[in-house]
Image (cartoon, rainbow, N blue to C red):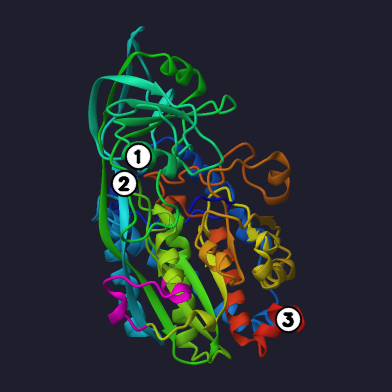
Amino acid sequence: MPGTEEQGLLHSDTAGSSGSSNARQRDGRAMRWWTLSSRNAVSLLTVALLAGAGLGIWAYGTLPTSDHDEHPHEYALSINNIHTHLTQLLEIAGEHNNSRSVTNGHAASAEYVMARLQTEGNCDVHMQRFLSPVWIEHGVPRLRVRAPLDVEYISETDFSVMRYGGQGARIRAARVVAVADACATDTTDDVDGAVAVVAMSDRCTLFDAAYALEQRGAAAVVVVRAARYKTPSRARVRVVDWKEGDALMHIPVLSVTYSAGQVLRHAAAVDIDTDTRIDVVETFNVICVGRTGDATNSVVVGAHLDSVAAGPGINDNASGAATALEIHLTLARAAFHPRNRLVFAWWSAEEDGLLGSRHFARVLAHGWRNRWTATERLGLLWSDIALNLNFDMLASPNFIALVHNGSDASTSARAGSLQIQRVFENYFCRHKYPYQLSPMRSGSDFVPFLDNGIPAGGILTGASELKSIDERREHGGLAHAALDPCYHRDCDGLLNVNMLALTRMSRAAMYAVSSLASISDLPAFLNGSSPFS
């Protein structure tokens, strides 16, 4: 996910007696992982955050027996089982280049989830296949002005290759054309064989502008950022809701800072080297359709299962995926019979632009078909879906308990989204846990549901944003530090998991799932005409 988070208890496989051979074996596994995944000093910050928050479990103590009786499913959820799932997913990442991305360990991760569902679950398990474009940058790019000055720019400081910005290329002494209006369709600028330097406009998308220049013969596109930005952009140059058959860039697309752009606009010749690749690969969502409950009021519980290519993604988002898995298995073991059918989904290609959940919505809401759709029978209609719950990053080291703000939903989904928000708030208020609202506009798999009129909500614990002093007073942890210092990095492993956060957030997830599945008149509750009970 593009994320957010808070703090908790360090849980490491290295605990135990040094005299025990089993403990030494566990120590060895943990140390091998540490060597593989924690190369950066930031891991020390993570350990400090987790260890420092360890007293949190003691501070909040045990809860009254009556609360266990009133909310049995919440307490039946085993955090140890969730941690076991995380351990398995980390091992899968270790066998696939320390990653569970679409082209690394995602398929093996999905096989693990499906195996557990098929042996212990109570649902019909489906694979929903689709194609996803995967962009990889293999080497450091170069950008050099050859004339009238000789200037070598610094990658990631002065310029960067934008994501999905074409295949690798080697361009020498190309002339430069400053394009006055990148969105104009009737421009007379001769960009054939040239490097087109453009400023962005809100009248067209970045992809539309760059692709139009490629179609007119440009050798590369350089996008100049506005002066208020001090670093180049890594935005995607791609159709947002990409699907099989949509175009992709072939020529390089670079972003440069405003100051670098002023020099480039007046350059006579430039060199560009990029070492990138776009591959279109097959991947799949895992869909678990419940066998009981009202099918016309289905609750879709979603979490993305893939990670970024740069790391194992244990907080982002094995934490959400493992929580969703254990919620389903716990309810199956308890022979839970929901009034409203539960559908669990483990999305693929979230880190590539929410492509798995977008595909799910495109097929069900709009009847879109690809090469596999005709043989896939999900037993689910879009009109059957009452709401979506999204769990993305539930164990950030420096966490803040965050609840998605239902007010951000579109008009057609706002009333229901606010009701979902209140369910989560009920959990945090009942336990007297601090929480705050988080925007629900973009960045995770609730988006395709909201875009198509389905109420949504969820919880998270934060990503790279910094905790303020006021937030530190309210939630603990470290001020001026990232909520997840290992966000999208190779150190996002088990030592990046805050067990206090995972405990609170996974139980909040179970509370919401079991409660919403049990409401007798779900449509009336979502439109606000029936109270939550």
Which one is earlier in the sequence, the residue at label 2 or at label 1?
2
Vertically, is 38 above or below 144?
below
**Mark 1 or 3, closer to the camera:** 1
Identify the amino acid type marked 2.
Trp
Which one is earlier in the sequence, the residue at label 1 or at label 3?
1
Q: Residue 272, how many percent across, how many down?
A: 29, 24
Q: Residue 508, how many percent across, how many down?
A: 61, 69
Q: CA distance from mark 3 to mark 2?
A: 45 Å
Residue marked by disc 3? 532
Relative side of 25 to 296, left or right: left
Q: Is residue 99 visible?
A: no
Relative side of 479 to 192, left or right: right
Q: Nearer the viewer, residue 447 or 476?
A: 447
**Mark 3 or 2, closer to the camera:** 2
Task: Label 1, secondary structure: give it.
Answer: loop
Q: Quadrant of residue 461?
A: bottom right
Identify the amino acid type marked 1.
Gly
Q: Residue 518, how many percent across, how many down?
A: 62, 87
Q: Which mark is residue 165?
A: 1
Q: Quadrant of residue 132?
A: bottom left
Q: Which residue is rendered at x = 35% and y = 48% of the image?
A: 311
Residues at circles 3 and 2 in contact by the CB criterion of under 8 Å? no
Vertically, is 402 above or below 411?
above
Residue marked by disc 2? 135
Q: CA distance from mark 1 to mark 3?
A: 48 Å
Identify the amino acid type marked 3.
Phe
Relative side of 517 to 179, left or right: right
- Assign the C terminus to one quadrant of the image: bottom right
Mark 1 Cα-neighbour bin, 10 Å: few <14, some 14–19, many ≥20: many
Residues rendered magenta in the picture: 363-377
Residues at circles 1 and 3 in contact by the CB criterion of under 8 Å? no
Q: Is residue 16 visible?
A: yes
